[in-house]
Amino acid sequence: MAKYVTKTFAAAAAASVMAMSAGMAQAETWRYAFEEAIDEVQGVFAQKFKEEIEANSDHTVQLFPYGTLGESADIMEQAQAGILQFVDQSPGFTGSLIPEAQVFFVPYLLPQDTEKLGEFFRTSKAINEMFPELYSEQGLELLVMFPEGEVCMTTQEPVSGPEDLNEVKFRVMTNPLLVESYKAFGATPTPLPWGEVYGALQTGIIQGQENPMFFIESTKMYEVTEVITCAGHNNFTTAVMANEEFFEGLPEEEQKMINDAIDVAFEHIIDYQKGLHEESIEKIKAAKPEMQVNVLSEEERQPFVEAADEVEATFLEMTGESGKKILDQLKADLEAVQ
C-alpha cells in the first residue's frame, strides 16, 4: 500500500509539473530533477547550475531532489517525455536504455585520484563525443558526466577478500553488469530500489550495499551496517541530460548559456569533492565510534582486480562491437591522463 501511495503521489506530482508549462523552449521556468538530496553532490551541482542560469538569463530553474517526483526510473521517463527539461541520473540506471553506459561499472577502470578523474571527464573523447550519440538515440542531450567519489561497501562483517562476500546478499542497482560484478566478487547480488535499502538492511533481507562515502554518511547507512570496506574498485559516475527536443528548440545563445553553466558547475563540483571522502569518514566515526572503516591493501585487492577481467569480458558480451569501441576509447582517454 505504501508503494502504491508513493507511486500515486509521484504520478500526481509529475502531472502537476506538466500542467505548469505551455511550451518547453519558451518556458520561463526550467525543471531539473536528480537522484540525491539537495545538499548531496548532485544537489550541489544542480544548485550551481541554477545559480548560473538565473544570473545570466530571465529563466528560473526549479529543482526536484530525490523522491519529489518518484524513483530514478520515474524521473528518466519524465525527462524523455518532456515533463522535465533536465535530469541527473547515473549510467547505472540508464544501462537498460544505453547498454554501453554500463562500462562505468567495470571494476578498477577509473583512477581514484580526484585531479586525474576531473581531467579524464573533461577531456575524454568517449564521454564527450561518443556517448552523446547514444543518448541522442533515447531523446536525450548529454550535457556532462562527472564523478561523485570512490565507492565503498558497507556490510555486517569485515571484508578482506571475495571469500568474505560468499552468500552475502548485496544490494545493487537494477543494472545487469553491476549484478555480474558482485557475482564475480563472490556475493549474492540483490537489485532493490534505493527507497527500500535502509529497511532491508535493518531487517536482514540484505547484508550489504555500496555507495560513495558522502552518501553512506548522509543516508545513515552506517546505522544499519557495521563495517565499511574501501577496495578501490570504482568511482560513482553520474550524467546530466536535457530533453533533446527542448534543447534543440532553444536559440543558439541559450544552448551556449546552458553549456557554459554546466562547465561552471562541473568545475565547482570537482573542487567541492576535494577532501569530502575523508570528511564523511570523520562524521561517521563521530556518529558511531565503533564503526569499522577498512581500506584494503594492494595485496588484499588483487583477487577483486582479477575478478574485474571477468566483468570486462561480460560487458563486451553484452554490448558487442559498440561496447568494445567505447571501452577501447575510454582506456585510451584514461592512459592520456595517467
Image (spheres, rainbow, N blue to C red):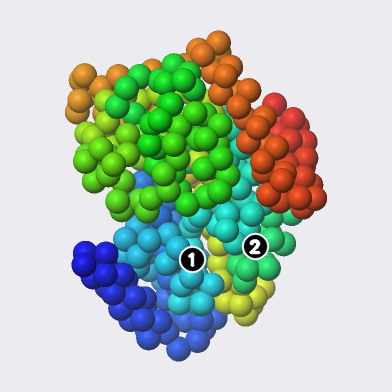
Marker disc for residue 76: 1
Q: Is residue 110 above or below residue 138?
A: above
Measuring from the top left, give residue 323's x and y in whole percent: 73, 48
- Quarter where residue 142 is shown: bottom right
For label 1, the crowd category at 10 Å Cα-Cα, with few meaning under 14, some 14 to 19 and many 20 or more, is many
- Residues at badges 2 and 1 in contact (C-beta under 8 Å)? no
Measuring from the top left, give residue 183's x and y in whole percent: 52, 35
Q: CA distance from mark 2 to mark 1?
A: 12 Å
SS label for mark 2: helix
Using the image as rendered, state which of residue 45 and residue 327 is in the foreground. 327
- The residue that appears at 44% across and 16% down in the rendered structure is 160
- The residue that appears at 51% across and 77% down in the rendered structure is 81
- The residue that appears at 21% across and 41% down in the rendered structure is 203
From the viewer's perspective, is 270 left or right of 139?
left
Marker disc for residue 135: 2
- The residue that appears at 65% across and 62% down in the rendered structure is 135
Return the disc, 2 or 1, that comes first in the chain's sequence: 1
Q: Is residue 213 visible?
A: no
Marker disc for residue 230: none
Q: Is residue 19 visible?
A: yes
- Quarter where residue 315 is shown: top right
Q: Is residue 167 above or below residue 171?
A: above
Measuring from the top left, give residue 337's x and y in whole percent: 70, 31
SS label for mark 1: helix
Task: Look at label 1 and name its amino acid.
Answer: Met
Using the image as rendered, state which of residue 150 and residue 26 is in the foreground. 150
Task: Look at label 2 and name its amino acid.
Answer: Tyr
Q: Is residue 220 above or below residue 129?
A: above
